[in-house]
Image: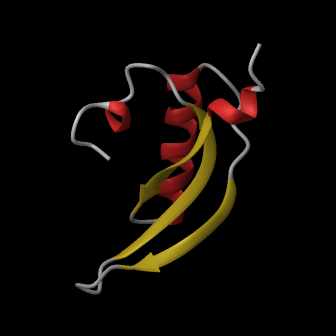
Amino acid sequence: MADERALSIANFVRAESPQGLRRSMLINNARLGAMVVYFDISQVVDDKGKRYWIAWFFDTLKGNDPILSDGAL
C-alpha cells in the first residue's frame, strides 16, 4: 500500500474576510467529512489590489481530479 502522503497535494480555500475564511474552512471540512488541519493562513493581494485570505491544507489526490486530465499539466 502506498504511503498516503504520496497521494496528497496542497490545496486551499479562500475568502474576502477572516470571517468568510472561517466559513469556507467549515464548509470544506463538511465537504471532506473530516477535521482538516490548515496551515499557512495568510492575507494576499492580487494584481488588481483585491485582498483575500487563504488557508492551505493537504488533500488526497483522487484519480478523477481535474489536475490529472489531459492538457491540465
Q: Is residue 3 above or below residue 17?
A: above
The residue closer to the viewer here, 53 or 59, is 59
The residue lying furthest to the top in this view is 1
Q: Is residue 67 above or below residue 15?
A: above
The percent position of residue 10, horizontal first and vertical second, equals 58, 48
Query: What residue is drawn where x is 56% and y is 43%?
Result: 25
The percent position of residue 51, horizontal first and vertical second, equals 38, 77
Q: What is the quadrant of the N terminus in the image?
A: top right
Query: What residue is drawn where x is 42% and y is 58%?
Result: 15
The residue closer to the viewer here, 22 or 46, is 46
The percent position of residue 46, horizontal first and vertical second, equals 33, 79
Query: What residue is drawn where x is 49% and y is 66%?
Result: 53
Picture quadrant of residue 70: top left
Query: What residue is drawn where x is 63% and y is 47%?
Result: 57
66 vs 29, left or right, is left
Q: Is residue 62 above or below residue 17?
A: above
